[in-house]
Amino acid sequence: MMKAGELKIETALANNDVMLNIAPYLDCSDLMNLALTSRRLLEQEEHDYDWSLVEEVSRQMLCKMQTDNERDALPRYTDGESWLSILHELELLRSPLVYDQLVGNRIDYVRGDMACITSTNTDHENADYIEIWTGTPQTAISNHIMRRGKHYAKFTLTGCHRLNYWWPGIMRPINWLSNIPTPEFCFWDSSFYPILREEKTGRWGESNVHCCWLYNFEGHCTWGDWESEYRHSVDWDGMEGSSIDDCEFGMLLDLDAGTLTVYKDGRRLGVMKDGMWPDITLVYAYSQLYF
């Protein structure tokens, strides 16, 4: 039996103005947890809008909070897409860029900083070996999905020591924790393409660039079409690589123009790839080979 006090609270929470006053103090998970306290917040009732109260509150919060650039970067794909999910993506857009998930052995965050990763080599002291391959690549993936607009990320490499392979780039977002069956996953490995193709949605559009990365030694642009299971490696104007030196590579993804522009130590090298459209997320892979 519902008590009178509980009824008053539920009635108050079902009031649009009350919810709008509370919502700015909550993040998306808090807003959803609050909504779960009352079915009236999640159910579509007799409103002037075609969604639940919590959806309407999310929509109004977006209207108040978003800048013009943020609104351009977060278009609503379909009429049925949740306003609450877009509000969540706005929170991610405003948050520092981090690697939410790490795959592989000997990869970890540096002192808990999710924007900084490290890879160690257990055979580092075995310099007498002519050639030591230290295992499969380690991969770091960001959960932030870029829909539209311009996005810039910097990859700063330090403590390389001897010979290192590393691949900064972008890929289609995947529900990879549940669908990738092995810690040896790397986004450029064509053996995983059949699994990755299952992630395709209408949001990908017509682009066949499903992953794209910079190969560090010569600076080649390498990209994959998960439909064809073939990797393309191409030269591009301004191509420049880096082997063992500490350096900084920047990538500017322009989803309005569909281009990926590369910078090295603050210098603009050029457009590495075009023909890319949303959805896209950031990815970085790393491995070590000692001579």
Image (cartoon, helix red, strand yellow):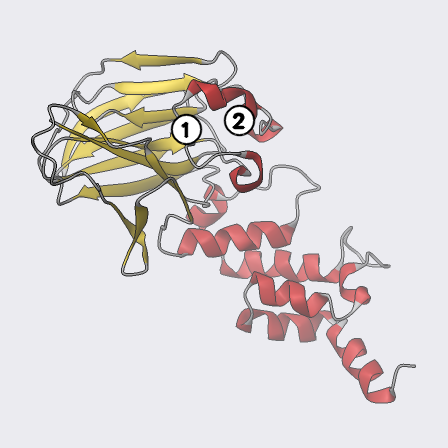
Q: Position of residue 37 (x, y in %)?
A: 74, 71
Q: Residue 139 bears which disc, if any?
A: none
Q: Is residue 255 visible?
A: no
Along the line of sight, the residue nearer the viewer: 209 or 66:
209
Please tell me which residue is depicted at 46% across the width and 45% down the height of the picture.
143
Q: Position of residue 258 (x, y in %)?
A: 39, 26
Graded by Cα atoms within 10 Å as few (under 14), some (14 to 19) or many (20 or more), the crowding at tag 2 reads: many
Along the line of sight, the residue nearer the viewer: 156 or 118:
118
Instruction: Report the side of 2 relative to 65 (left or right).
Output: right
Quadrant of the snapshot with the N terminus: bottom right
Q: Is residue 32 above or below residue 186?
A: below
Q: Is residue 84 visible?
A: yes
Please tell me which residue is depicted at 26% across the width and 23% down the height of the picture.
271
Q: Which comes before the other along the chain, label 1 or label 2?
A: 1
Q: CA distance from mark 1 to mark 2?
A: 9 Å
Q: Residue 187 bears which disc, if any?
A: 1
Instruction: Report the side of 59 relative to 135 (left or right).
Output: right
Is mark 1 in CB contact (under 8 Å) with mark 2?
A: yes
Quadrant in the picture for residue 75:
top right
The amino acid sitting under disc 2 is: Leu
Q: Position of residue 26 (x, y in %)?
A: 56, 70
Please tell me which residue is depicted at 60% across the width and 70% down the height of the picture.
23
Q: Position of residue 112 (x, y in %)?
A: 32, 60
Q: Is residue 140 above or below residue 113?
A: above
Instruction: Report the side of 182 relative to 60 (left or right).
Output: left
**SS label for mark 2:** helix
The amino acid sitting under disc 1 is: Phe
Residue assigned mark 2: 196
Graded by Cα atoms within 10 Å as few (under 14), some (14 to 19) or many (20 or more), the crowding at tag 1 reads: many
Please tell me which residue is depicted at 32% across the width and 28% down the height of the picture.
260
Q: Is residue 11 above or below residue 40?
A: below
